[in-house]
Amino acid sequence: MNKFLKIVGAVAVINIVARLFGFFREMVIGYQYGFSHAADSIFTAYLIPNFLYLVVGGAFTTAVISIYNRKSTNQGEFVKQSFTIVLSSGIIMTAIVLIFTDPVINYIFRDNTDITPATIELTKYLLYWMMPSSIFLILASWYSGLLNVHNKFHLSSFAILIYNVAFLVIAVGLSFIIGPIAYGVSAFVSSIIMIYFLIMGYRKLDTYPIGLSFARNATTKDLWIMVVPIMIGGGTIQIYAMLQRFFAQFLGFGDSAISIVNYASRLTQFPQTILITAVTTVIYPILSKKEADDDHESIKSLYSKGLRYLLLLMVPVSIFAYFYAENIIQVIFEYGNFTQEGTTLTTPVMQIFVLSMFFLAANTYITRFYYAKGDSLAPVIFSIVNVFVINIAVMYILAPSIGVNSIAWGTLISSIANALMLVGYAHFKYGLKIGSGQSLKDSLKPIIPLLLIGCVTYLSSTYLVFDYKWVTFIVGVTIFGISTISLFMLFKIKEVEEYMNVIKKKFFNNK
């Protein structure tokens, strides 16, 4: 477990830097365009290629890793077969979106009388530039999967870093020349840079060559059987994001609703994406190998310990983000065209989204254990029920009374329901139990320190507010960090004690 945590930690550090640059891009958009229609156009146009990259590319990657590790797989032939399928799928889906760009964009904005023809055209042009990047992004996800199979986790993480850095630099530089269209051009060019880096990294492995193969057999059939359900069950966060932005427009929440939802959701996705990307990047290849070796006890132990680490990491972060929501938005976004009014509108939406952070992260983590078991059907059923039924129903029911906040409530309620279904089914079907190998006392031990962390954070956010927003933030982070570590140590939370001991040993050994 210690080796696993070290690998996760290294990947997490790279991911933090990579996601920071992606986050800086959102900050720059907020600074340049605030809650304008131009900002809405950028977010709307980027939604589809990003969705295809994360959901379709992620589904192919997960399925490829699982099938690649099977003893019966002809790995050399499968690399070529899967490459052909992924490339063809990316081209076809991109072509379909480009063909139907006009009617799709017109449909999205059909009931919004505030949208000008110029804004609609801007969205279309941005999508024309961004959509071709989907082909390279989906292939990049596939290459990352192959690198992870060979334990080259850092290369796939560096690829995301390179993509986000290039996207930010090119977009900002060109925006002074060609305006918002710069973000479309940058998305396309950055995807090419990313795929080139991954191709070079894979070639250095000196393993099976990449090529085209249109041969069809049981392996390719299994690939499709896994991919389609995983796209629905494994892309929950991305599907939420697409539905959130669609219903922000469809339900008529008014001007800038898309931007409000985007800024709020981005802030909450940032910490969970860093952690989950790091964990799933490392854990799924390991899980697949252990499942192939029938090492069920290790899988059960990893399931229980992983969820506990997730709880100890995500819940304190959620507490801080909830109570300091307004201050976080001020520090990150409130510059240029992003005004105090924008902060006021975004804060309550963010606070509701924050409450779903742990559950969304847990859902992503748990589904990897289902996939390792070869079960992609159960997560799909749960996702359909929660994302497409409960989520949408909550939005429709609450929309008339609470407006755009209903979108965040839909995500929260449905993510909790989804987590309960995944945990319950995994318990009875596969014997994966929360708290496995621990006494009830040890399992409940984090509750009191978490409650105390909540109290301390609430008091500091209420009474330690200063005229300068950065002072408020720095003081809040300092008190939160010290109180969290101190309370976990005081109540003898084993995982935290072990980690602190590792740090002490390294410090004194260096001395």
Image (tube, grey):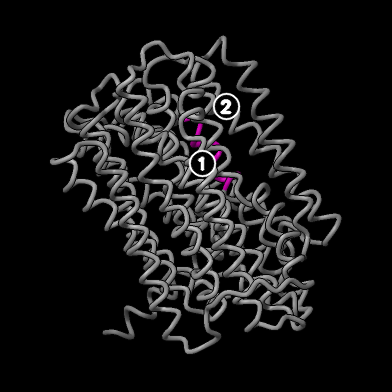
Identify the residue at image location x=33%, y=86%.
509
Residue flagged by tag 2: what amino acid is it? Trp
User: Magenta segment range?
Assistant: 351-360
What label does residue 415 carry, if any? none
* Label 1 Cα crowd, 10 Å radius (few <14 / some 14-19 / many 20+): some
The N terminus, quarter of image: bottom right
Q: Main secondary structure of the magenta part?
A: helix
* Label 2 Cα crowd, 10 Å radius (few <14 / some 14-19 / many 20+): many
The residue where tag 1 is placed is 97
Q: Quadrant of residue 189?
A: bottom left
What label does residue 409 carry, if any? 2
Identify the residue at image location x=56%, y=32%.
243
Q: Quadrant of residue 298?
A: bottom right
| 401, above or below 341, in the image | above
Q: Where is residue 178 shown, x and y percent of the image?
A: 18, 39
Q: Is residue 223 left or right of residue 31?
A: right
Residue flagged by tag 1: what amino acid is it? Val
Q: Where is residue 265 shown, x and y percent of the image?
A: 45, 36
